[in-house]
Amino acid sequence: MDLHKVYPVNKRRVVALDGVDLSVEQGEVYGVVGQSGAGKSTLLRCVNLLERPTSGRVAVDGRDLTALGSADLRRARRRIGMVHQHFALLSSRTVAGNIAFPLENAGVPRRRRTARVAELLDLVGLGDKAKAHPAQLSGGQKQRVGIARALASDPAVLLSDEATSALDPDTTESILELLRDLNRELGLTILLITHEMDVIKRICDSAAIMESGAFLESGKVLDLIATPGSRLASSLFPLPRTDAPDAVSVTYPRAYDEPLMSELTRRFGVDVNILAGAVEQVAGTSVGRLNVQIQGERREGALRFLTDKGLLVQEAGR
Ligand code: ADP
Ligand code: MG
């Protein structure tokens, strides 16, 4: 979609999006990670056209939103739910009232509204909180209300702007689990933005690293891990740099049953010294990286053996 967004700020031009191509597959969880100011929120607001891109096209659920008139756009937006970092709940309304709000706007009759709200409360695990007010809820419960409200119009896509950034680690975990469950059970496509690599690790199938309005890399998380020089992989496995002689970094892009390192020493007679390592559960599989010193006459053959086995062998410290 080659999105560009330029904000005019006091006669200066702030380029918030500088040619972003984002393509999210139906039914996947896609995470965009980047530091503050990278343009993540702008990107998300362009996806539901709360913000008009300066140039580029936005298609959601098969429809080109940029080409729609305002009435059609309003209808198309109902297929897109949005969850906010600071919940954005109406404090004067009950939990049920907050979730009913978008349904009222869409003109859903009262009876259907009440049934739908009860359903949504159950879905997010707040069946007993219908009559509570937001001030009586914990952060995690507030975000559950935010998610239920976003799902009220039965969207095909859920956008999440730092949904867990205001939450403590345990609560973050439970909200991420809820998002993952919704993705699996409802087939809900989720596009989330975050500054936390942990979020990518826990629930994302695909990811992009964003900096200065552009993607540095993007794709399936497991493919990125297997890509030489991947920034995502190095932040996933933050191993200490090493200048030990003959050191290499070996990345396992999937779980292996075979004891590769002992086979290596047996077959090639090399010495293997493990300097550092990390294993992570990512996209439902175990992946890892080892920094190892491999020494011996048949070192080259040993490295080729690892590469042939599908491991990624790079200079250590990269
Ligand atoms: P992130 O969500 O990654 O922190 P943003 O999308 O909020 O990044 O911001 C990207 C850049 O665009 C920043 O330089 C920010 O100051 C600028 N920006 C964002 N929104 C506006 C706006 N409404 N008007 C002017 N500049 C903006
Ligand atoms: Mg932001």
Image (cartoon, rainbow, N blue to C red):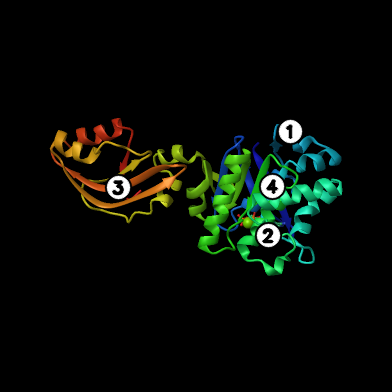
Q: Which x, y percent locates residue 55?
A: 71, 40
Q: Are marks 4 and 2 in contact (CB under 8 Å)?
A: no
Q: Earlier in the sequence, mark 4 or mark 2?
A: 4
Quarter holding ligand 1: bottom right
Q: Secondary structure at mark 2?
A: loop
Is 56 rendered above or below residue 92? Answer: above
Name the residue that disc number 2 marks.
Answer: 128
Q: Secondary structure at mark 3?
A: strand
Q: Earlier in the sequence, mark 1 or mark 3?
A: 1
Report the amino acid beneath label 3: Leu
Q: Which x, y percent locates residue 64?
A: 74, 34
- Residue name at image x 84 percent, y 48 percent: 111
**Dot 3: within a 10 Å radius of its alpha carbon, few (fewer than 14), some, or many (20 or more) residues?**
many
Report the amino acid beneath label 2: Asp
Name the residue that disc number 3 marks.
Answer: 290
Q: Are marks 1 and 2 in contact (CB under 8 Å)?
A: no
Spatial CA span between label 4 and label 1: 20 Å
* Eye-nearest disc, 2 or 3: 2
| Residue 212 visible at all | no
- Residue 63's label in the rendered image is 1
Name the residue that disc number 4 marks.
Answer: 5
Ligand 1 lies under 8 Å from the Cβ of mark 4: yes
Question: Which residue is at the far bottom?
Answer: 135
Spatial CA span between label 4 and label 3: 40 Å
Report the amino acid beneath label 4: Lys
* Eye-nearest disc, 1 or 2: 2
